[in-house]
């Protein structure tokens, strides 16, 4: 498929499996969707660390990825703690607030 309305789909998704680029992370946060992130380069490793620190999802080391590792990470993120945390972030006024969260 040449195009999918990712932002609209995330509003209905239980988990977002992503490389952790800023655009996708931003859309997942706005949708309140928890993430499983496999960072590859650029800003992605830092985004993945911050997502994990804030309890918004799980970072997976791409060098260790396997179907079992991904399934385990997705099951972990389906836990209500991650969903609740992701849902609460969507109510924040802006991304600058995320930088200050602890």
Image: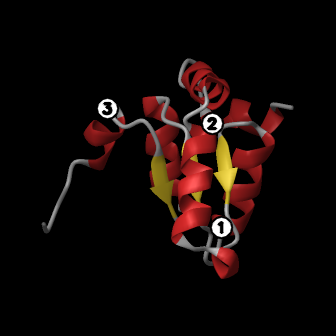
Tell me the residue that label 2 is attached to: 95
Q: How many marks?
A: 3
Residue 84, position as x, y percentages in the image: 60, 21
- Residue 21 in the image: above or below residue 42: above
Residue at image mark 1:
43
What's the residue at 34%, 31% (across, down)?
A: 11
Residue 52 picture location, percent across and down: 74, 47
- Residue at (61, 53) in percent of width and height: 72
Mark 1 in CB contact with mark 3 (< 8 angstroms): no
Secondary structure state at the residue bearing disc 2: helix
In the drawing, what numbered circle is on residue 12? 3
Q: Position of residue 95 (x, y in %)?
A: 62, 36
Mark 1–mark 2 distance (CA, rounded to whole Å) = 15 Å
Front-lying residue, 64 or 20:
64
Task: Residue at the far right: name it.
Answer: 102
Relative to 86, 52 lies left or right: right
Which badge, 1 or 2, comes first in the chain's sequence? 1
Q: Are marks 3 and 2 in contact (CB under 8 Å)?
A: no
Q: Quadrant of residue 31?
A: top left
Mark 3 vs mark 2, CA separation in Å: 22 Å
Mark nearer the N terminus (3 vs 2)? 3
Name the mark nearer the viewer: 1 or 3: 3
Q: Nearer the viewer, mark 1 or mark 2?
A: 1
Q: Residues within 10 Å of mark 1 (few under 14, many from 20)?
A: few
Q: How is the image coloured?
A: secondary structure
Q: Earlier in the sequence, mark 1 or mark 3?
A: 3
Quadrant of the snapshot with the C terminus: top right
Q: Is residue 96 above or below residue 49?
A: above
- Name, please, the residue furthest toward the front: 68
């Amino acid at each position: 498929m040449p195009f999918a309305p990712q932002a609209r789909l995330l509003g209905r998704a239980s988990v977002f499996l992503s490389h952790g680029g800023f655009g996708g992370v931003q859309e997942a946060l706005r949708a309140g969707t928890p993430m499983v992130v496999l960072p590859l380069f650029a800003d992605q490793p830092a985004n993945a660390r911050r997502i994990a620190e804030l309890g918004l999802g799980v970072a997976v080391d791409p060098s260790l990825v396997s179907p079992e590792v991904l399934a385990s990470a997705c099951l972990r993120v389906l836990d209500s703690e991650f969903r609740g945390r992701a849902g609460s972030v969507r109510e924040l006024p802006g991304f600058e607030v995320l930088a200050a969260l602890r």
